Image (tube, rainbow, N blue to C red):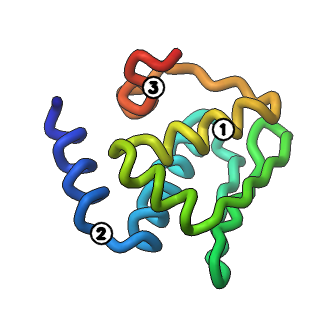
Amino acid sequence: MNANGMIRGFMACHMKLEPFVAHVVSCVKRQLEEFDPTSMFFMDCHTNFFLFYGQTFGKTFQLIMTFAEAEELKAKSPYALDRYIWQEIEEKGIPIKLSTHYLQTVFMGEK
């Protein structure tokens, strides 16, 4: 495992859910902005669920995830939540290119 994977694994194990999800959102947002500078990606935290929404390449998307689902992904693997969000974005018809180290790490062997 590379240093980034070790750090993310430590974060997944030791951070509380909301700050961890906020970190993942910032990673996704940075990558989207690298692909399309006009991209927007946001997270709203409600009583027992997260709402993720945004726009990139002229297409809008949104995703609702319960705290339990997010906690399960957080426990599954360090990049499972990232992978889930990226797969949902891709299902909305937004092409995802595995052209960056971050996305290659997120999808290690998945695509």
Residues under numbered marks 1 and 2 in contact, where contact means CB atoms less than 8 Å apart: no
Q: Residues within 10 Å of mark 2 (few under 14, many from 20)?
A: few
Q: Which mark is residue 107?
A: 3
Q: Which mark is residue 36?
A: 1
Label 2 element class: loop
Label 3 element class: loop
Q: Point out the frontmost of discs 1 and 3.
A: 3
Q: Quadrant of the N terminus?
A: top left
Q: Amino acid at mark 1?
A: Asp
Q: Point out the frontmost of discs 1 and 2.
A: 2
Relative to the observer, which residue lies in front, 100 or 77? 77
Task: Name the side, left or right, on which 58 lies relative to 33.
Answer: right
- Residue found 74% across the figure and 54% down from its top: 63
Locate residue 59: give its quadrant.
top right
Task: Name the side, left or right, on which 51 lies relative to 70.
Answer: right
Instruction: Say above or below: 35 vs 32.
Output: above
* Residue named by callout 2: 15
How far apart are the alpha carbons under marks 1 and 2? 30 Å
- Residue found 77% across the figure and 49% down from its top: 55
Q: Amino acid at mark 2?
A: Met
